Amino acid sequence: MAVTEKAMHATNGHTSPPASKPADGYTIIGSRPVRPDGVDKVTGRAIYGADVRLQGLLYGKVLRSPHAHARILSIDTSKAEALPGVKAVVTGADLPTAADKVEDLGESAINLKYLSANILAHDKALYHGHAIAAVAAVDSHTAEEAIGFIEVKYEVLPPVMTVDDAMADNAPILLDGLRTDEMGEMGSKPTNLAKHFRHQQGDLAAGFAAAEVVVERTFRTETVHQGYIEPHTGTAQYNTDGQVTIWASTQGTFAVRNQTSEILRIPVSQIKVIPTEIGGGFGGKINVYLEPVAVLLSKKAGGKPVKLVMSRTEVLQATGPTSGSNIRIKIGADANGKITAAHAELYYEAGAFPGSPVGAAANVVLAPYAIDNLQVDGYDIVVNRPRSAAYRAPGGTNAAYATESVLNEIAEKLGIDQAHIRLINGAKQGDRRPDGVQHTEPIGLLETVQAIAESDHYNTPLTGKYQGRGIACGYWNNWGGKSSATAVLNADGTVSLNEASTDIGGSRASIAMQFAEAVGIGYEQVKPRVGDTDSVAYNDVTGGSRTTFSTGMAAHNMGVEMLSQMKERLADVWEVDAVEYADGEFSGGDNHISFQEAAALIYKTGEPLMVSSTVFPRSFGPGFSTQLADVEVDPETGKVTILRYTIAQDVGRAIHPSYVEGQMQGGVVQGIGWALNEEYIYNEKGQLLNGSLLDYRMPTALDLPMIETILVEVPYPGHPYGVRGVGEVNIVPPAGAIANAVANAIGSRMFELPMSPARVLEAMKE
Amino acid sequence: MAKKVMVQTVINNDDTTFVCETRQTLLEVLRDELGMTGTKEGCGNGNCGACNVMLDGVLVNSCLVLAVEAEGRTVTTIEGVAEAEGLHPIQQAFLEHAALQCGICTPGFIISSKALLEQNPNPSEHDVRLWLAGNLCRCTGYDKIVRAVLDVASAGQAKAGA
Ligand code: FES
Ligand code: FES
């Protein structure tokens, strides 16, 4: 029984773009202008990582380990070096010895020794695809041939692929020096368990004793990849004066600079990172993979620039992904559905080096709900898979999937509506997160649940036997981080806005809009550009949903400052005490001029006008999302079709609603892929079997209906326009919402992601 | 050094002759030899559509076409879509609908959408989704892309009816 075209919820008729009008009380914010980089991106002119072309450019290729776990006994590169056209070959032996210390160089902390060993393996290959050596040659085919001539002798070791493998007695050890950090105490034995931490509140035993129902379940989720369509690239030139230039497709140019500096022991002052356009990141383009290797190759090749571009298989084998996990959740509730106690145990696979997102997951796992008695245990475990990288609300999707599944079981047992149980338990201002952090400002979780409960979707009944409906909530912390920007007033009344947050989804527009709003000029008068690491002060990564929030705050500050300086300058010129500015007009004494005229006058009468702002907001508004999924299950094949999907998300204030909706839709569709299809499949040797986009199956347009969005605006008071990060929280609920819908459709619950057809069929037999 | 072959083609209405190795794909030659980097590589094996071009009016994945196969044929790439007067309506619709986020998939989607509307000027939502299933986008969830294409189609219908 295939789901028909008509059964899928259609476009609600509208195909013309939504009207672009500002929100109440604003002149720009809330409108939907075309992004400044738009024309370049629809005409093919925009330059992405692989599009960089330089004089004398060499092309590089990386040799990767065919084994998941092996000691490297020897590497002989002589035959590769002898191949005509080969200009340089490097291995881990070319890397300087890294310091054995933990540093935060991007979005999360890592030991520099491990960071270095992930670039080019030191003594061990720790996953299938681990970089072993690299070649630069006159063209990519020659480089490809050359890596085939590199001879590596391995001692193959047994692979450790899962939490269970890694925690087993006598498990093979990945990292000789690793010891368990057991709630702050360092262990003495070699281990694969890097860390165990705990959050605790209230009295867990008393809470469970007070419960009418207790549900305890164990879940397994598989490794998934961010899946950006642009593969990783890295282009670098090592100049003979020791200056390094890197062209990077990255979420953070300064993160690339810092990591390259630490790995290669080159001072940051000698490294300039130039951002290209970036073809998606989702957290996966913060860690460096290729850039330091390109620098090493360029140096060996006498300073010729070297470009490395990964194949899709390399991307899947050796970058990203996010953690597979084992999660146990126990929740107790009283007869009214009020949660009395909850215990979560999160076992996250970090990949080859410590640093899974289990810390963030521990904050997400119970966060939508106000729970007096709780305990969260987090475990960070190394396995022979690629080093995990951030992926949109890192760790949150798996964690929420488990919580939301158990919560629905409780609701079913108590006969409570699934939206209602979330209203009963939903967190409000003043409640605490599992780690004790209090929501001191207003939060919008309950508003999002309410929006779903009142939606047309929720109030439209299902129509088919194998249809089901599920709700889930999600939380994400968001981030502030450091941002820097400058703004130059041009003589024609335009403003050149120079910032350093790489733009992955329209942030040049949202930042320019906030500047224009602050100044009271048109959006088209603001010309934003993303500069390199020499052009502004330090700037954190585009990640943590922070760019429109923090860099937007810097833009706002600059707008305010520019106006005040303009007033002072005009007061001097006009020889008046005070200048006023309203409705785009400066006035003082008998003088009245427009912004544009003021810019010309300032240009003529004195020094050029430029302002700057650096910000580091320590507080920021968390994001909540509630989502509703309708599915239909094909009882013959087990295939799950999404019939209708609605997202309600607290976005604080939507600066550019189209891009906010786009973030919500995109995050949800990634979550749908995670829930239904996507997973890393390894053979018993630990080799990745599905390293292509055919076999690693991400959602296509045909797999989906339109994704309906409800923008709930509970402004965050700590931002001049009430902005909250919007990029990440949307991916937290989908797996939970879909799991609840599938359970509703087939009448039995599944405890494993993805809910692929074979697994669904299996569950339907029960 | 592999032996090189001379290939004569018409690319975006310009007579174009290039020299390539027989193992080079059309995608590689467009990007690395001709400097036309608007056509993107997302997978290199036919699974993502980022490399879509038209070959003699037929939609192809240029990563699956050898450059030598372009001999005597016409190629349209993203660089050839905009018209002298300005953007093509599909390009304009992608901008107005915010149908791109990172934009790496956009050239492929535009070429593919153009091919669809040339052969089916009045597609249903399902037609659009089916046709575009060969193009992966990881950022948008496709919603705004599908709307943009439907918008161009209905504007075209309105014009045809006028
Ligand atoms: S690059 Fe050709 S289909 Fe992906
Ligand atoms: S816009 Fe990024 S892949 Fe489509």
Image: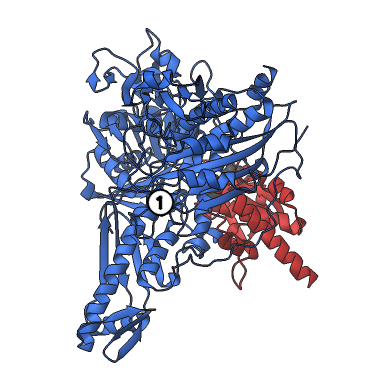
In this rendered view, identify the residue nearer to me: A188 or A694: A188
Residue drawn where x is 71% and y is 43% of the image? A8
Left or right of A81 on screen, residue A16: right
The quarter holding residue A233 reads top left
Any part of residue A342 in sight: yes
Q: Position of residue A561 (x, y in %)?
A: 27, 69
Secondary structure of residue under mark 1: loop
Residue at numbered disc 1: A724
Left or right of A357 on screen, residue A505: right
Quarter of the image for the C terminus of chain A: give it.
top right
Output the chain of dot 1: A
Apparent colour of chain B: red
In the image, ligand 1 is in what quadrant? top right
The quarter holding residue A3 reads top right
Position of B150 relative to A183 (above/below): below
- Name the colouring of the figure: by chain
Q: Give me the chain that's blue.
A: A
Position of A26 relative to A151 (above/below): below
